[in-house]
Image (cartoon, coloured by chain):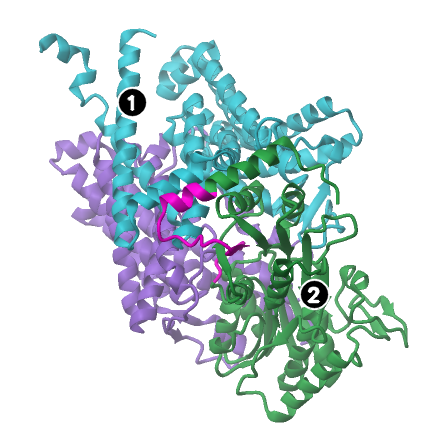
Amino acid sequence: MDAGDISWWSVLIAVIGGAIRVSTPYLFVSLGETLTEKSGRVNLGLEGVLVVGAMSGYATAVLTGEPWLGVLVAGLAGAALSLVHALVCSLPRVNDIAVGISLFIFGTGLAFFLGKPFINPSAPRLPDIDFAWWSSSPQVQSALKINILFIAGFILALFMAWALKTTRWGLMLRTVGDSEEAAKALGYNILRVRMLGTVAGGFLAGVGGSYLSLYFPGTWNEGLSSGQGLMAVALVIFARWDPVRCFYASLLFGGATALGPALQTVGITTNYYLYGAAPYFLTLAVLIYSSSPQKALEGAPGEVSINR
Amino acid sequence: MNSSGLLSSAEAVTINVAAFAFTMAIFGVYVAALGHNPVDVYYVLYLGSFARQISIESTLTNAAPLMLTALCTAIPARAGLLVIGGEGALVVGGVATVLAGVALGDAPFLPGVAMMCLAGALAGGTWIGLVGALRQYRGVNETISSLLLNYIAIALMYHLITGPIRDWERVLKTSSWSIPESLRVGEMEFIGVHWGLAAGVSVCLILYVIMRRTTFGFGVDILGGNPRAAQMAGLPINRMVILCCFIGGAMAGIGGAFEVMAVHGFASESLAVGFGYAGILVAFLSRQNPAAIIVLAILLGGITASGGLLQRRFDLPDATTQVLQGLLFMVVLASNAAYGRLSVFQPASWRTA
Amino acid sequence: MTRQGYSRRSFMHRAGSLMAASAVTAALPGMVAAMGNVTVGFIYVGPRQDFGWNQSHWDAAKKVAAIDGVTVVEQENVPETAEVEKVIQSMIELDGAKVIFGTSFGYWDSLKKMAIEYPDVLFTHIGAIWKEGDPTNVIGYRGYTEEAHYLCGIAAGRMSKTGKIGFIGSKPLYFIYNNCNGFVLGAQSVNPDITCNVVITGDWNNPVKEAETTNSLIDQGCDVIIANVDSPKVSIETAEARGVYTCGYHSDLSPLAPKGFLTGAEWNWASGAEFVEAFLAGEPYPNLKRGGFKEDMVQISPFGQAVPQEVRDEVMAAKQGFIDDTLMLYKGPLKDNQGNVILEEGEVKANSDTPFKLGVDWFVEGTVG
């Protein structure tokens, strides 16, 4: 095997490893948004929620030395912020998309405000599990050091897919999201279901933020999120409101993100801005290919405003 | 204006003023909790945004690009589309302006500037027009496609300014070629704000008239309110949607043109500093009304402008103004629920009383 | 000096600023505005506690604030748009600032413009590209960090076991090329066969990309990493977690990597304090100041515990070489990594040869990328 082979092999490993490392925040936010949208609301503010989660998780870990406590606090902070969204949207004649955008501004502002003193200190990181005991290659070992949150996200995706399809709670959520008429006829409390859907979605997005600050890349500063929360909301539509497809979409997006740096390390150094945009090109291409003008997207909740 | 129009305007003013006061009260509690005297903070907010000529100039300078990017969301929204691509449209508009300016060389000032504006408008318009076309002919969700196109526009701009159109003489910052000095527009004569403000105010007013007074505007409102009714009325829906997207994108493209012609003289990373995203907020708060966009852009610009003084006088973080903006807009949106609830503004309540 | 900028409007500015200053002091008791005090404004492009670029200027701000009778006002996250001009005007007119430190490259055009409008205010910029004809109340100053990178390279060359080191750059700009070349040349001075993989992230601040790049470089076998980004914190912590060596940039990052930190290339922006003192005393100041170790414009971070004494000695000897002007960074024979001859055998470029350094857009031989 000559040097060239080693390089290409390591690009592949780096993309796989990168997919696993980079995808987790996208996965959690998109699962959270799926819950919210299935209940009939859009929360475009999850970018703000993600950043608040990242900051509060990091701050908690710095102050207590307990990264897992940070994850919990991040989730709770995310839930609290989303509760504001849920409450404001419960008022009549309030546009949920506009509220989402102001939550985005408010959340990032609050996180930057309160997070100033935490830019400098270092926090303990979340541990990872080594799945590469069988390999002696350091590349493979590093790619397969997998964080528990990634595994949790995968299991959660499977569970959500099952629960949405088969449980009474899932049915209630879907009914409220699909048709207010039907939900009323069945006697569901629409506002309460939507509130729960939004708050649970915010919890997940907050946890996704804590992954950014406490594991990968594992820091807190104002440039930490480069729009992961906003992009994850888009991935939900891309994944057609299917939790398992959210998982695939996040992996695809993560892998595409890792492609640029991996290519540069093996000496392909031109056009790096274009490689950097690969995830966006790819998503757009798949979207154009898979959309159809004749019918609405399958799986789309009928009451969600961005589908009308 | 008839009396019910006056009443509803009075209602809107009352509700918005109350929302503003309520927000300021919450903000006062927030800064008091941090150990500052709220009255001092209010004063500095005012001082930094509107109290002096320099403050007003800062405010208007911040507001200028927001007026143009807000239209990129507002106009398509009137036809029922949620486009968030103002950032990308501004960036491609700016790059197109540079290319046009360089190609024009020593063209005379006015025609040169007009051509550069046109180039920016065409580029931005095409960019968002594409979003509308994808939506109408391929069924691609316009919110996602416009978001993705933001990232793609920025990546393309970076690619161009670090390679094909890079000016290597600018050693400190990767920048494109510069437009000729003779085609720079700079600040207005009577106030220290660049010409982008005049452009923003003018196009907002023109679009206000178009959307309120022309058949096209009425048609768009029907389409936005009830697509099925528009279909039955035989309106050319596809063309109208794409045209609305084109207009919106063109306005953000003109925003990019003025960033280049009036501020930088070249394209660089400083085109992508969030004007597009702030514009979305302005569009929603103005309820897609182009005339209201002027006012809200100035309000937003004023809050941003006062942020500097809050940092320097109270050592408050720069994000303070962002917190205040988010809070204000949340309260204003929530106050929408109050419309029609205040009996004093309902003529019916006068008769029964 | 020309006075074309002295228009009616700037006169009104000045009149307004007097009124503003008195109004503010009257309205806001307890605020610093003692007579005879001079206010100095610092404008940062990011947060000043970033363990990186902005922090290196914050360190300078603290030095300036220590001067008798000087009050420092600071504003963070100011974008390189029309906003910065308004921030400068606001600092001058509402805070009465007499000196403005603009600490980001893209502020240059705005600083020059404001210098014409406010001829009695001193402006400093960190790009050091002032030239004859620019306003004389502007100072450009900057250190040759490539010299400090050369020292980091020596430590890296001695400590690397794989013979591969990694450089992460933010933007394709001349000083990034020079820093990388310094790093590689330093490493090659102690290990001629060493190679360096270079990755340009394309962003000043993008933690996810920086962490991913650090991982990629380590996967490629690089065992010393240096990151020329706004805040190298992420890269250093990632490398430390994976057990490889790191070098710092901008400010002292040794606390972030107790095991793997070697040393780091640091600025010494504190020399800005001298300009303020000269300006206040009415003494002459330079309009352009560049320099390396000889002029005390750059420094290196404290050595990490991993660095053995003989390597430390070697690094310090090279530093002395820069101070004595006996060690030259660019000397022939020198090729770039495309095989083009840059300098012939015997050809030497002085360390102070700025025009040559400004034109560097190539990596030296042994660099992959």
Quarter of the view holding residue B339: top left
Q: Residue at x 36, y 43 (%)?
A: C27
Instruction: Indicate left or right for A244 with C357 as reference.
Output: left
Q: Nearer the viewer, residue C173 or C327?
A: C327
Shown in green, the chain is C
Residue extent of the magenta highlight: C21-48
Above or below for B58 versus A200: above
Which residue type carries mark 1? Ala
Q: Colour of chain B?
A: cyan
Q: Is residue C96 magenta?
A: no
Q: Which residue is mark 2?
A: C369
Chain at tag 2: C
Q: Colour of chain A?
A: purple
Q: Is residue A289 visible?
A: no
Q: Residue at x 18, y 38 (%)?
A: A191
Q: Position of residue A83 (x, y in %)?
A: 24, 46
